[in-house]
């Protein structure tokens, strides 16, 4: 080979090598409007990803530095959403309700399309069956699945199982929670019908021993137990009251019959009680949420209570619930905060819910559609709204796991 050809070839090889070396990022998300509440970012920013982590966040990052670029122009880039109340201990056990049975849902098909990268199963399993839940759902899902461990050893199996005070063991629940610290992020009490405080106190004791919050699904008592007592005397700062905008039989509502927020509710929130939406199939009313928001009371976290009884009703998905609050007057940054960074802090997983450099690259790319949309509560009432959130791309540890319109893919050319 003539010498000048050799020189040209060496130059081309060097140029290619330099180009490859210059591509230090796996993926670049470019041109999107970044909302990252933890870091106080609400502006146009590019986000670069390398080896499943956030590698850079800056106003302008050159596309030549990335192997792949996702054009997020006109879209909103947020941390992966955290749904703090779902039901995903799914299986085929008969008459077991949400504990390895038919009413729970496999997470990947119902969370990732809605931008949810982390879901917390709210009490499906107890200390007796958590290992089964972990083996068949937590360890096999692309979605990060965490858990509130039920104070009932058999979990949320429904009916008499959840009334069995003899199966509510604070010591054993706390031991299991400590054994799986970081995966079990809280204790759950739900569906207890008795008019006594014993089960609440047992759940709080388990939470105290494991140093984690408890989540209470309260109601069904006859006579009705006092929410004021629950908030100000029984629960600790950091404990969670879910279904906060419900009005169900056997439970005081937080907004009274005159449309006024109960006077102790803001006091409880200031004390540190966490108010979680937990929409579900029967636990969200506009008649509670609209006047509460109008009086300056906002939820600490938005969640779905996702299961077969809610997914095809007024709830639908995490983004649909978030859209309701967007149309009830909360700003988009506020809605994103209570659906990402706030839940991360509540469940003591502050490694999640933000896009700091070095953090895991769990990301949602969303669009906000403008139009006339109907949103339905759990009593069947419809509220019209002008905005609706849509999940465009979901990334889990830097990998695209949902892409509605192919934003992450190259254009086909014949």
Image: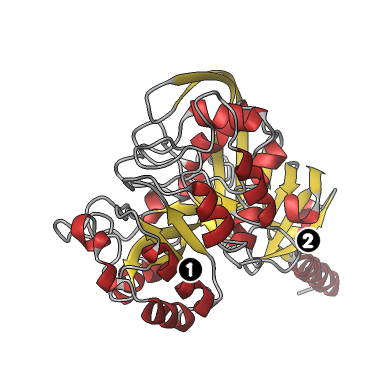
Is residue 277 placed above or below 93 in the rendered structure?
A: above
Asked which colour scheme the image uses, the reply is: secondary structure
- Secondary structure category for the residue under label 2: strand
Kindly identify the residue that appears in the image at 35 percent across and 39 percent down: 310
Res. 56 mark: 2
Coordinates of residue 279 in the picture (x, y in percent): 45, 40
Coordinates of residue 39 in the picture (x, y in percent): 79, 55
- Secondary structure category for the residue under label 1: helix
Judged by depth in the image, the label closer to the viewer, 2 or 1, is 1
Q: Is residue 266 left or right of residue 372?
A: right
Q: Which residue is mark 1?
A: 204
Compare residues 400 and 193 and report the one nearer the observer.
193
Q: Is residue 203 visible?
A: yes
What is the residue that sits farthest to the front in this orientation?
223
Can you tell which quarter of the image residue 206 is in? bottom left
Is residue 195 placed above or below 414 in the rendered structure?
A: below
Can you tell which quarter of the image residue 250 is in? top left
Kindly identify the residue that appears in the image at 85 percent across and 48 percent down: 59
Is residue 330 placed above or below 151 in the rendered structure?
A: above
């Amino acid at each position: 080979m003539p010498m000048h050809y050799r020189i040209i070839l060496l130059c081309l090889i060097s140029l290619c090598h330099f180009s490859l070396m210059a591509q230090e990022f796996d993926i670049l998300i470019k041109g999107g409007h970044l909302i990252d509440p933890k870091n106080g970012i609400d502006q146009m920013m590019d986000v670069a990803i390398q080896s499943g982590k956030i590698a850079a966040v800056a106003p302008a990052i050159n596309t030549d530095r990335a192997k792949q670029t996702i054009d997020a122009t006109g879209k909103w880039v947020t941390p992966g959403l955290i749904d703090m109340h779902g039901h995903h201990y799914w299986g085929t056990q008969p008459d077991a309700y949400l504990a390895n049975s038919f009413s729970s849902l496999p997470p990947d098909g119902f969370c990732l399309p809605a931008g949810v990268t982390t879901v917390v199963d709210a009490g499906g399993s107890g200390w007796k069956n958590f290992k089964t839940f972990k083996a068949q759902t937590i360890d096999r899902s692309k979605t990060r699945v965490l858990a509130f461990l039920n104070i009932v050893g058999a979990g949320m199996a429904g009916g008499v199982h959840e009334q069995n005070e003899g199966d509510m063991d604070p010591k054993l629940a706390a031991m299991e929670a400590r054994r799986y610290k970081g995966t079990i992020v809280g204790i759950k009490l739900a569906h207890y019908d008795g008019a006594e405080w014993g089960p609440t106190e047992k759940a709080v004791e388990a939470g105290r021993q494991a140093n984690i919050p408890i989540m209470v699904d309260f109601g069904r008592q006859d006579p009705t137990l006092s929410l004021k007592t629950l908030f100000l005397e029984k629960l600790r700062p950091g404990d969670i009251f879910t279904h906060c905008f419900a009005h169900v039989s056997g439970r005081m509502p937080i907004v009274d019959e005159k449309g006024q927020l109960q006077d102790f509710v803001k006091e409880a929130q200031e004390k540190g009680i966490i108010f979680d939406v937990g929409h579900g199939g029967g636990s969200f009313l506009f008649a509670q949420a609209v006047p509460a928001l109008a009086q300056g009371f906002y939820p600490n976290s938005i969640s779905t209570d996702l299961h077969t009884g809610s997914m095809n009703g007024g709830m639908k998905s995490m983004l649909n619930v978030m859209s309701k609050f967007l149309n009830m007057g909360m700003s988009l940054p506020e809605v994103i905060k209570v659906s990402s960074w706030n839940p991360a802090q509540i469940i003591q997983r502050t490694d999640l819910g933000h896009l700091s450099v070095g953090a895991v690259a769990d990301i949602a790319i969303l669009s906000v559609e403008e139009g006339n949309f109907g949103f339905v509560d759990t009593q069947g009432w419809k509220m019209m709204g002008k905005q609706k959130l849509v999940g465009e791309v979901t990334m889990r540890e830097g990998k695209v796991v949902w892409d509605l319109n192919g934003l992450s893919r190259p254009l086909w050319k014949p």
